[in-house]
Each structure stands twice: as structure tokens, then as C-alpha cells.
Image (cartoon, rainbow, N blue to C red):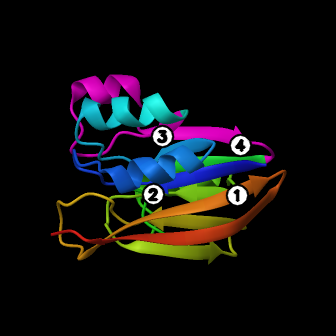
Amino acid sequence: MTKILLLSDSHSFIDDRILEYAGQADEIWHGGDFGSMEVIEQLEKIKPLKGVYGNIDNAKIRSEFPEVNRFFCEDVEVLMIHIGGYPGKYTPLAKLEIASKAPKLFISGHSHILKVMSDPKNNLLHLNPGACGKQGWHKVRTMMRFVIDGSEIRDLEVIELGPKF
């Protein structure tokens, strides 16, 4: 059983609440737009960190994280792309990756819109944790946590961190 904290679009912002939740997870996954190496360093001090770079991330971050991250967590294949869209509205890159081999779990960020959607056509679950940072048009900062247990994804929770102001 692996407890995952999923966040995205931190845009150089991290606070004690994010770090507290990070400490409760086994792994931290970030859907891109870290914004700064400081965010990465703080998260990596707590738990193993997986992620992708986002459109605002600099060359240093892009050298540390890929644009497309495909990996297994237990028996669940995960595909992560910052600008990936969602079922029915995937980006060209996401369409290509999903068509080559559909994962069980597809994660994106970028939109700052929290989404949990099934994609019956590709037999996958799509997650976008919204934005945990303070930059952008969203009003409430959000993250997600869930458990991967073998091939099962369960106990999904939306974490509201409060208003961005």
C-alpha cells in the first residue's frame, strides 16, 4: 500500500500545510509548474518526489524532471503530463502517449481546475489536483491524496487548503 500526495501548480509557493500533508504520504507527486527549485528541495527533504516540468519551469527544473513521466506505482501504470487535458479533450501529446499504451492513471495539471474523471474509452482514471499555489485565477488552493494498493486506486480525498489570498 502506497499513500500518495498529488499536487500541481505550486508556482514557487509552499507552506506548512502542504508540508504537513507531505509528511503523511509515502510519495509526493507533482503535476508541474513547481516554479522554483526551493519547492522541489523542500518536498524532497520529506518524501520521494516524482513529477513533470510545467510551462513556467526554468531550464534547471526541466533538467531534473521530464515533460512526460510514465512509471509504475505498485501494479498501477501512471502517466503524468503537465499540459495533458482531460478525457474527451486531451492535448496532442497526451493523445499520442495514451494511444501508444493507455495507463491506468493519467495525471495532468496546468488548468488549475481540480478534476476527477473516468475515461471509459481508454479504461483509465484522470486526476488533476488543481493548484496548491497562489498564482493563477483559481480561488481555492487544492491538492489530492489517495492510496494505491496493488492494482487498486482508492481512498481519494480532495484537500482544500483555503483561499489563495
Residue drawn at 42 percent across, 72 percent down: 114
In the rendered structure, which disc, 4 or 3, sits on the residue that comes first in sequence?
A: 3
Marks 1/3 in contact by CB < 8 Å: the verdict is no
| Neighbours of disc 4 within 10 Å: few (<14), some (14-19), many (20+) | some
Residue drawn at 17 percent across, 60 percent down: 135
Marks 4, 2: nearer the viewer: 4
Q: Is residue 31 left or right of residue 16?
A: right
Q: CA distance from mark 4 to mark 3?
A: 16 Å
User: Is residue 51 shown in magenta?
Assistant: yes
Q: CA distance from mark 4 to mark 2?
A: 17 Å
Extent of the magenta region:
49-75
Residue labelled with disc 3? 68
Q: Position of residue 45 (x, y in %)?
A: 44, 29
Disc assigned to residue 147: 1
| Neighbours of disc 3 within 10 Å: few (<14), some (14-19), many (20+) | some
Pick the quarter of the image with the C terminus. Answer: bottom left
In the rendered structure, which disc, 2 or 3, sits on the residue that comes first in sequence?
A: 3
Label 1: which secondary element:
strand
Residue drawn at 45 percent across, 30 percent down: 44
Label 4: which secondary element:
strand
